[in-house]
Amino acid sequence: MDCAKIPHHRMSTTIPPEHTDPVNAQILSVSEDLVSGFQRQPFHVIAEKSGVPVAVVLERIRAMLEAGVIRRVRQTMLSTKLAHGALVAWRLPEEKLNAAFDFMSKEDPFSGHVVIRSTDHEISGSGYRLWTTLKVPVGESLDHHATALLRLTGAQEYLLMPAHGVFALGVGHVRRKTLEPGDRADEPAVMSTTVPVNLTPEEWEVLLALKEELTADEIIENPWAGRAKIAGVSLERFCEVAETLNAKKVIGRFSTFLEHIKPSSSGERVTRFNGLFHWAVPKGREIEAGAEVGRHNCMTHCYWREGGPGFGNVNIMGVVHGTEKDRVLAHKAAIDRHLEEAGMPVSYTAVFWGGRSEIKPSEISPKVYRAWHEAHA
């Protein structure tokens, strides 16, 4: 019997769901961040790359999703091409911090990563405790939306830090567990830009149907058939348009996102610590420095962002996750040494540790944006 046809609730009771299970780890080492672009049959690609039969891939991903080990399965978008975006640091009275976190994570679909951060000691910018990523549709204003959030949460101040370039973007927690500090690619990372593109109405319909996370019932060999119906086109046309979107470089990767903060149903955690690393390098050398930082395999994110005087004039930022704090710091120390050996001056560096956090895809629909602002005027 084809496993893709077996109801998922009949299968997952006897299947090990933890990310540490050898077969699951083999699947996750590919499915987290190695399936690039749009794929007509993404689970077949995972099976081929991992060496695990597609029927087993389907049942294991389904079981991990039901157990909360995987928090979502979805086709990601390169939202830097579809929306204006920025990392936002918020300064709030301490007594309003958790309420603001709740509002950003539950009531604002345009805020993606929502994290309360702290530092080991007082440093430049340590008064900004709440950090979010923010996206607004092309043509809309990040400042306009952030000002509305400031009013609604009682925040005192915000700082927008849009990305001028991206050097690393891909999570891969399972694959990164075995990395040694200093492990890096043979060549410097190549910076990608954040210039938005224009889409036709049909492309928007397909994109909005494509980007929503898959339910357990959609973990099947052909997951896009139902999405084509939502978009109002045939499956063949849906795939053709998705491939056009891929050529326009607005499609990211197909990914199974692990729940890396909260414990699973059995109490296991994928990771315990995440450090947001800051470096300030000389103006004019940001691309060179970002390429050297981004080539380190431990980096899940690496950007050129400007923090200004309030953050020691930081201009290179990146994130590393790990199960041990000392290990995360060892990765940073290795990058620091590499920058020094490469002759890159660093005038300021810091680590902001992630605490309470919620991670969700940022909404990019112009219709949803207009409706949200009408409701919160």
Image (cartoon, rainbow, N blue to C red):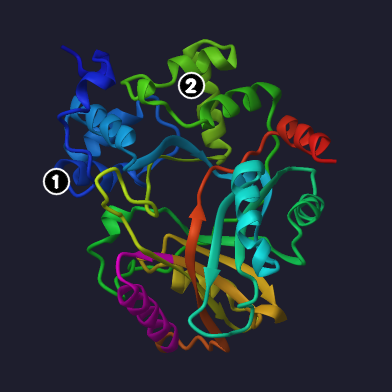
Q: Magenta stretch: give its range.
A: 320-340
| Residue 184 part of the magenta-drawn span | no
Q: Nearer the viewer, residue 311 or 323?
A: 323
Above or below, comparing residue 253 to residue 339 in the picture = above
Q: Quadrant of the N terminus?
A: top left
Magenta part, dominant SS: helix
The disc placed on residue 22 is 1
Q: Secondary structure at mark 1?
A: helix
On the question of residue 238 being in view, the answer is: yes
Q: Secondary structure at mark 2?
A: helix
Q: Which residue is depicted at the point 76% across and 67% down?
A: 157
On the question of residue 80 being in view, the answer is: no
User: x and y percent of residue 115 in the render?
Assistant: 54, 59
The disc placed on residue 239 is 2
Above or below, comparing residue 16 to residue 311 in the picture = above
On the picture, is 198 further left or further right than 285? right
- CA gap between label 1 and label 2 equals 33 Å
| Residue 321 part of the magenta-drawn span | yes
